[in-house]
Image: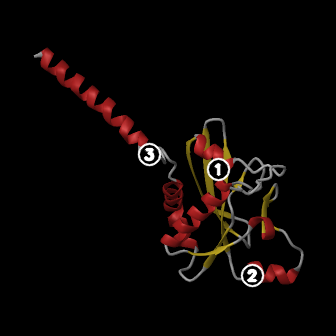
Amino acid sequence: MKPKVLKKEMLKLLLTSLLLPLLFTSCVYKDIDGANNFQAMLRALVEKSYAKFDQNIFKDETVLVSDFVNLDRLQNHSKLGFLLSDSLKNSLLNRNILVREVELGNDFRIGQHGFNLLTRNSNRINNQVINENFAVVGTYSVTTKRLIVFIKLINIRTGTILSSSSASTLIDEEILDLERTPDARTTYAPLVL
């Protein structure tokens, strides 16, 4: 009788050890071909924060969405920031949240004092912000092993962060390539045949 019990326990252990890796790989934002699925990552972030979005944002209200910035530089000059930003906008729009695109470098900046408007012209401020109460701001950090992405719902009037969520994925060559910023000294000459 003990050998049967032992076999059942071994079988349970074997099945558990096979199923656990499958469960954990479902949290990785990779497609079958190994490419990063940034859209799935941002969709998951919006889903995590959607209850707070739904509590604060009225159906006909528009939110500002800026470009994602790297926390190390607080600037966006890479393809990665633009790709993450567009994926966020798409995910918000799919949840029927109206989006107004903001060019972070021209109008706003995330600096050491938070989400800042980059003008002192009051007419420009009124035209840019007066109708919107909320912004969804995205940032990311690239560590030696992971890409960590954050989104925050911010009340522009009070500066209060109403919701925040994060996700991460392992660093690979695709992410590093998207994060590389073009060298200002590099000139690409047209190909002449």
Query: Decide: marks 1, 3 in contact (CB < 8 A)?
Result: no
Q: Amino acid at mark 2?
A: Ile
* Alpha carbon separation for disc pair 2 and 1: 34 Å
Quick one: quadrant of the C terminus? bottom right
Q: Which residue is mark 2?
A: 130
At horizontal 19% and vertical 18% (from top left) the residue drawn is 6
* Alpha carbon separation for disc pair 2 and 3: 45 Å
Residue 184 falls left or right of residue 85: right
Q: Which residue is mark 1?
A: 178
Q: Which residue is mark 3?
A: 33
Q: Amino acid at mark 3?
A: Asp
Q: Amino acid at mark 1?
A: Leu
Residue 84 in which image quadrant: bottom right
Q: Is residue 62 above or below residue 81?
A: below
Residue 165 falls left or right of residue 157: left
Query: Decide: marks 2, 3 in contact (CB < 8 A)?
Result: no
